[in-house]
Image: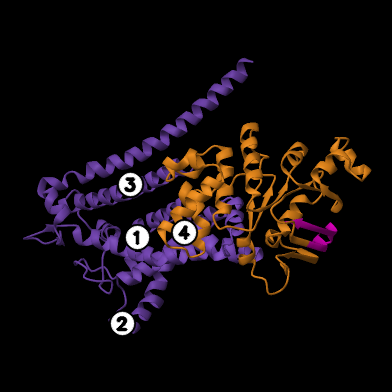
Amino acid sequence: MNSKIVSIKDFSFYYGQNKCLKNISLDIAAREVTSIIGPSGCGKSTLLRCFNRMNDLIPNTRVEGTIHIDEKNIYAADVDVVDLRRKVGMVFQRPNPFPKSIFENVAYGLRINGVKNKEFIADKIEKGLINAGLWNEVKDRLRDNALRLSGGQQQRLCVARALAIEPEVVLMDEPASALDPIATAKLEELIVELKKKYTIVIVTHNMQQAARISDITVFLMQGELIERGKTSEIFTRPSKKITEEYITGRFG
Amino acid sequence: MNAARFKEKFVQRAFLFNGILVIMILAGIFLLLVINALPTFKDVSLKEFLTGTNWNPSSDYNPAYGIVSMVVSTFMVTIGSLVIAVPIGIGTAAYLSDVAHPKVREIAKPVVEILAGIPSVVIGFLGIVMVGPFIAKLTGTYSGLNALNGSILLAVMALPTIVSLSEDALANVPKSFQEASLALGASHWQTLVRVKLAAASSGIIAACMLGMGRAIGETMTVLMATGNAPAFPSGFLNSVRPMTSTIAIELGEVPYYTTHYHALFAIGLVLFLITFVINMIADIVLHRYERNFR
């Protein structure tokens, strides 16, 4: 089954007058890991943040074209951004747990949705932490402050927090960039595990990481989509010369 | 070379001297308070002073030196002002940091801060000519110079501190917390209440404590607006006479080195100890918070 869950058509994004995403069209399949790579400033993060409309927070921006998620245009006038963001979770570049307990961090998404049933919340939290591979490390200290965890644990906690409200798509914006190699390896294992249930879109600077964990790789440059293909093909025989030059490290 | 070293030493000594001077002056004030307060207790027992409700030091036959009614008055007016100022202050801070257009904030915040510069005598004046008659009309009391009036005025005086420092605390909450909350499908309102206010709570508590510190020691405003009845207050519509007013009113007329004179210093000492304890509690709250969350 390879149904597309996200469908981007002729999509452009402007910061003021500056067009930083140029007429991008791209489909993203469900239950796969899609990685977006490209040199700094190419618009990877901007594109990712369009999927849950986080860019709405930046003043003076506008979009053209459409992004359909589950066959609904998320930039249509009647879309509730709050609903969209419940369906499309996000993990950020730097771990950003709230200054609350581990338990409360994961419970946050449920609580803001009005869930009050304590057993239900406890159950979801356990599942979320198990899914994020963190349960065994924290089960005895769920009431500890989340900021006392190590960076890698914090980032997996952020994954658990995003998973607790059962999104369909999980966006990850360079999630390993602030982590050491061991924590990165754990996070990568987690991502591969998660694609059984979730659709994952990950922006990464690290080409090896993209090669290791993703099914599909998308190469962006200067706001344009240069190439999209199976990761194995992009990294072995890219169809465009410029992709090959980037991947082999001749620039970027 | 030698001249340079001499200069270095000289500057060091000068700063040391400044530091010691400030500490000495503060210690001196405290000592003056204690030395002048202690003789009170030759004539009045500490128990009577701290638990008596009757303050009538100028009576020839049966002078009384109980400070309870003025301590209660002080706390009534202070707590009343916090009940008014804290919700309004935090609300205003939240509005400025999260809702207001940046241009509105740029203008409104300095304006609020300027409010702190209004002399307390002017605020007291407003209490007499505006707030007082208004309260009198509303409640059918005679003058409107009462604890409620004082609370309202002190709230006005504490607001700039509370608004300004709370807004700073909210603005210092890392943007990443806000992003994380919004990305989980929280509304702006939920993000503000559950994440930003929670993360800024130490700064907000400090802001309120400083506001309280300002209110509790304020003299001129309460002297003008609360009616100055040295009786035990039974409600916010009673005239009250807080500790500060009592000292201000009586110290100018009291014969020196009498028990009455020393008792006024003792009131000052109690006031000092109360403020000291409040500041200590604020400090402990802040540090406990920092240990947990940093």
Q: Are marks 1 and 3 on the same chain?
A: yes
Q: Quadrant of residue A65?
A: bottom right
User: Mark 4 — residue?
Assistant: B162
Residue B50 at x, y = what percent? 17, 53
Q: CA distance from mark 1 to mark 2?
A: 25 Å
Q: Secondary structure at mark 4?
A: helix
Which is more foreground, mark 4 or mark 3? 4
Q: Find the distance from the CA under tag 2 to the CA under tag 3.
A: 36 Å
Which tag is nearer the camera, tag 1 or tag 3?
A: 3
Give the left or right position of residue A20, taking residue B77 as reference: right
Which residue appears at 29% of the width and 84% of the height? B140
**Chain ID at mark 4:** B
Q: Are marks 2 and 4 in contact (CB under 8 Å)?
A: no
For marks 1 and 2, the one nearer the N-term is 2
Q: Which span is picked out in magenta?
A: A8-29
Tell me the number on the disc at residue B43: none
The disc, 2 or 4, on the residue closer to the chain's N-terminal end is 2
A23 magenta-colored: yes
Identify which residue is drawn at 42% across, 42% down: B287
The colour applied to the residues of chain B in this rendering is: purple
Q: Which chain is orange?
A: A
CA separation in Å, label 4 and label 3:
19 Å
Residue B276 is tagged as 3
Q: Earlier in the sequence, mark 2 or mark 3?
A: 2
User: Mark 1 touching mark 2, by CB under 8 A?
Assistant: no
How busy is the neighbourhood of tag 3: few (under 14 within 10 Å), some, or many (20 plus)? Answer: few
Q: Are marks 1 and 2 on the same chain?
A: yes
Q: Are marks 4 and 3 on the same chain?
A: yes
- The chain that hosts pointer 1 is B
